[in-house]
Every structure is written in structure tokens, then in C-alpha cells.
Amino acid sequence: MGNSSSMLTQYDIEEVQEHSQRLFSQQEIVSLYQRFCQLDRNAKGFISADEFLSVPEFAMNPLSQRLLKMVDGLNFKDFVAFLSAFTAKASVQQKIKLIFKVYDSDDNGKVSFNDILEVLRDLSGSFISDKQREQVLTQLLKEAGYSKDSYLTLEDFVKVLSILFMFIIIVFILLFSA
């Protein structure tokens, strides 16, 4: 499986379905396999960072460098499992786990102030200054009961995200009610 000269067997399809928590139909897995084989240009059985960057939407993503750390060297089964978090069928918890992994750049199971700051910098570019980002993040963490020195576990991260979403909603309400 993963070699473009091979075909998926029914067993392979079912195994991939199980590995991706049955979020894809058998036909979707076959389509994903075809795409995987297109990306795996040298038929190595895995996709390299350079091959992922050949997808324009991926290359243009402001978080592409962080995502590359997560996807470099994925075989087909892990490729499908990675993509499963992006499906409409994925649970909120699955999506949050993926987001947490994007922030957890050193893969230690914890997110630091600097990890969050780096992602914010990647997402906002020069739209806001480093000082403004730090101020907003410091206040956000404070509202959630944390400080700049805190290391957030997945559970802590969810708490901070919920406060962030409420903050975003308030900002939109204020912007559009003026």
C-alpha cells in the first residue's frame, strides 16, 4: 500500500477506514489513494515535505511550515488519518487535537506562550505588531487563569480557545454594531 504501482485491496481499504475512524467511505479512500500516488512522485510509499508543497493550497497556507512537520514522511494510512480531522464528519475534539498539534511545535504535549505567539505571527503577519500580539495573548491567558510562563495541556488549550472564541464574537459584535 502506498506504492503507485500497487492497487488497494478490500482489506487495505477496510484497514485504512478503521485507522481513520471510519470518517471516509470506501470510495473516498480509493480517491485519496489516487491522490496520494500522484503526490508520491517516486513511488516510495510516503510523501515528503517537498511533495506536499507541490499542492498550491498547502504551500500558500500561512501555517504550512508547521504542518510540514506533521505530514513529512506520512504513509498512505497516516495520510488519510491526518486528513480525517479536516472532514465535516470529524468531531470537534478531533479538530481541536489537530489544532493543538499545530501549536505544539516540539511535540511535547504542551503549548507555551511562545508556541502560541509564533502561530499568531504566522497567521497575522504584519497586520498587528509583535507587541500587540503579546499584549492580546497575555490578556487572553490571564482571562483563562494562566500566565506567560504557563505550559498548556490539551485540556488547558481548550479552555483558552473557548475564551478566544468569545473574545472574537465580542469584537465582531462591536465592529458590526457601530
Image (cartoon, rainbow, N blue to C red):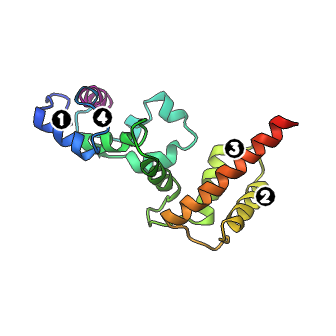
Upstream in sequence: badge 4 or badge 1:
1
**Badge 2, how many Cα within 10 Å: few under 14, some, many 20+?**
few
Q: Residue at x 50, y 50 (%)?
A: 99
Q: Amino acid at mark 4?
A: Phe
Upstream in sequence: badge 1 or badge 3:
1
Please tell me whether residue 59 is drawn above or below residue 74 in the rendered image.
Answer: above
Please tell me whether residue 152 is drawn above or below residue 12 in the rendered image.
Answer: below
Q: Is residue 24 left or right of residue 125?
A: left
Quadrant of the rendered structure where residue 7 is? top left
Q: Amino acid at mark 1?
A: Ile
Q: Nearer the viewer, mark 2 or mark 4?
A: 4
Judged from this view, the residue extending furthest toward the right is 178
Q: Is residue 158 left or right of residue 24?
A: right
**Badge 3, how many Cα within 10 Å: few under 14, some, many 20+?**
few
Q: Is residue 119 visible?
A: yes
Whether pointer 2 and pointer 3 mark residues with C-beta atoms closer than 8 Å, the reply is no
Residue ID for mark 1: 13
Where residue 163 appears, as percent x and y from the top left, is: 66, 57
Where residue 135 appears, as percent x and y from the top left, is: 77, 60
Q: Amino acid at mark 3?
A: Gly
Q: Nearer the viewer, mark 1 or mark 2?
A: 1
Highlighted range, magenta: 29-41
